[in-house]
Amino acid sequence: MAAVVAGADGAVLSEAFARVVNSRRSVRAFLPDPVGEELLHGVLQSARRAPSGANLQPGAFVQVRGPARERLSGGLIAAFRAGTQEVEDYAYFPKPLPSLLRRRQVAAARALYGALGLAREDRAGRDGQFERNFRFFDAPVALLVTLDRDFGSGGYMDLGMAIYGLMLAAQAQGLATCAIGAMASYPGLIRRSLGMDDQATIVCGMAMGYADASAPVNRTVTSRCERDAYFRVIE
């Protein structure tokens, strides 16, 4: 019989699964150690085990490396510093943001910048940290996640399951990840830089590699809402 442990809310989970799920974090500092192609492809293949409506398996993971990565990161950082704004391919946050969600957003920012020792008024320091999104946090593997523009909302749901599958598969192999929503702010720039056509919706980026355990930013701890906030029973 498989060993079991109590999850964060007291639920009983298999030990192996609980270890993977509960140890996953959004990592923003990586070691320079390369990730082997066979390992990367195995993680991607595991992610594709995620379910999808009619088995359509929407979306794609695009690895960006070498000169293409340098060109893309340089362009993104230049646009960010210039205050350039683009129309995003899809809306992520509700507008206006409800107060409950705003509090969660603020708490996450406090956890991140607190781990870095960056005060609220340190605009330069915070901007410098935010710029690291556009360098994929210097991770050895830089991915862009795309979705064909013709998909409806269900495609995002299915792709989201594959993204989480990717993150868990990576964690199970000793790798760390961080999804990068900031990439969605510059969809036109990304498509032009990489020669993508307009059918490719830019969903997010993904950094992957081996976590730098000594980096203060990786000590960021965010909370999760209580079960009553997301689960209810109707009889």
Image: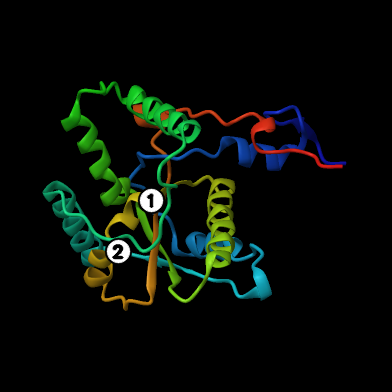
Residue 67 screen position, x and y as percent: 21, 65
User: Residue sitting at 47 percent across and 76 percent down?
Assistant: 150
Q: Is residue 137 visible?
A: yes
Residue 158 screen position, x and y as percent: 59, 63
Q: Is the residue under label 1 in contact with that under label 2 (CB below 8 Å)?
A: no
Amino acid type for the residue under numbered disc 1:
Gly
Q: Is residue 215 visible?
A: no
User: Residue sitting at 35 percent across and 26 percent down?
Assistant: 216
The answer to which of 39 and 62 lies nearer the viewer is 62
Question: Can you identify the residue that label 1 sits on?
Answer: 181
Residue farthest toward the left in the current orientation of the protein:
82
Q: Quadrant of residue 215?
A: top left
Specify few, some or many for label 2: CA neighbours under 10 Å numbering under 14, 14-19, or 20 or more: many
Position of residue 216 relative to residue 14, above or below, is above
Which corner quadrant holds the N terminus? Answer: top right
| Disc sitting over residue 187 in the figure | 2
| Disc sitting over residue 92 in the figure | none
